[in-house]
Amino acid sequence: MTEKAMHKITTLKSGLTLITVDMPHLDSVTTLIGVGAGSRYETKKINGISHFLEHMFFKGSVKYPTAEIIANLVDGIGAVNNAATDKEITYYWIKSAAKHISLASDILSSMIKESLLAEEEIEKEKGVIVEELRMYRDNPTRYIWDLYERLQFGNQPLGWDIGGEESTVTSVTRKDMANYVDSLYSPKNMVLVYVGRLPKDIEKLAEEYFTDLPQRSQYKPKSYEKNKQTKNRVNVFYKATDQANLILGVEGFSRYDEKRYIAKILSTILGEGMSSRLFIQVRERRGLAYHVSAQHGSYKDTGSFAVYAGLKLEKIYEGLQVILAELQLISKEPVTDEELKKAKEMLRGRIALQSESTNFLAEYFGTNFVLDNKIETFDEILKKVDKVTKEDVQNLAKELFEKNRFNLQIIGPFKSGEKFERILNS
């Protein structure tokens, strides 16, 4: 599949952007609606409402009044459907056989434009969401990311949990939901994506189901307030676990900062795959962890570079020291030509594999357009990655891994963070 055949962008009469990616060799299609809504658009009082609404849209619409009807229709054609809420975007999708694209479009459009938001369903769903939050909080490998972002970004929307707190979830009202939908679920703040085997009249089909979306006001999120960091931050969340979970990170780069391509190479060399530096040092040579990885993630105005490890309880201090030593080493000495080449090939290979998934492509195009109002193609990304040099990687490591810039989040049976602070400050 060539990049040139990848995607086509058109604007429907309602102002809604339509992105189509025709893959005629497939028998399936993913239909996705992306919305510029997420937890960073919330106030403290309604924290968690973006995620709550994601649940409510599956609970019945004017045309399909109950969750059971929607589920039966989706199951009845052998399709799968789901949704996801992040800090800056929410999306809803159905993956079906290509011949059922009309029904998938009908269900999604009805969910988005005429959701019932029934009072009794809202009250029922509060209990469901509280249990979901508890489930995540009982899972340290997931919950540690919420705690880490709270530590790095502080008490502002980017630092709050996507799911909210139990107290905010249980106090949300139908009026809060209706007001929130009115402020963000507008055609100009949304995108419709079809990926897979598409009919010739796909634009006509999109117009049929998505023209009469209500025009609504638009609300802008609060800007992220950068806090100048002058010392390392450590937070220990006490939990009686059999394994210590650790994230060591620093503030990274926004979606619009060219340094993010270098950060991607750096995170690949450090912690992507079984030949990465951290995997070899932490797992293979010392047997301190089963899982260790590094990643860089971006928001509109900031980002984070983070190393995650699940370590033996009695080896957590040694594990932290080994991770810090690797970060210092990559700051002091250039990576090898072989490492740089391998990292670039790995990124190229991962994109090739992901590009075979209609869901991955729908999420990628939907997210990019909602957040950036344009699409950065895979070819464009890879050209920028190819330009990264060994000097770029070393200079970025020096910039990121300076003393006093670290944020360390731990989950485990530890009463104090003092020893962790001493290791970071040594």
Image (spheres, grey):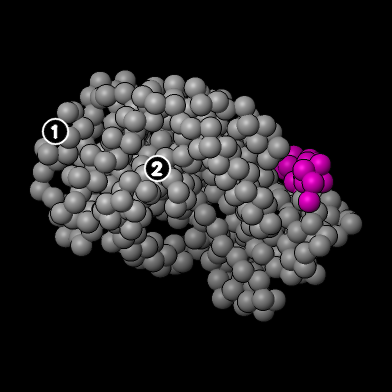
Magenta segment, which residues? 1-20
Name which residue lies at 39% across and 26% down.
333
Q: Is residue 259 left or right of residue 75?
A: left
The residue carrying pointer 2 sits among few (fewer than 14), some (14 to 19) or many (20 or more) residues within 10 Å by Cα, namely many
Name which residue lies at 54% across and 44% down.
89
Looking at the image, residue 28 lies above or below residue 49: below
Residue 162 belongs to the span the image colors magenta:
no
Image coordinates of residue 182 in percent, x first then y, are 57, 44
Name which residue lies at 67% across and 79% down.
76
The residue that mark 2 highlights is 277
Which SS class for mark 1? helix
The residue carrying pointer 1 sits among few (fewer than 14), some (14 to 19) or many (20 or more) residues within 10 Å by Cα, namely few
Q: Residue most toward the right?
A: 200
Looking at the image, residue 400 lies above or below residue 184: above
Front-most of residues 64 and 323: 323
Residue 147 in view in this figure: no
Residue 74 in view in this figure: yes
Image coordinates of residue 372 in percent, x first then y, are 62, 33
Residue 11 belongs to the span the image colors magenta:
yes
Q: Is residue 328 left or right of residue 41?
A: left
Query: What number is the disc on residue 105?
Result: none
Q: CA distance from mark 2 to mark 1?
A: 24 Å
Give the mark, 2 or 1, whose residue is nearer the N terminus: 2
Q: Is residue 295 left or right of residue 343?
A: left
Cβ atoms under marks 2 and 1 closer than 8 Å: no
Looking at the image, residue 233 lies above or below residue 163: above
Instruction: Tell me which amino acid carries mark 1.
Output: Arg
Query: What number is the disc on residue 422?
Result: 1
Residue 136, located in which quarter of the rendered image?
bottom left
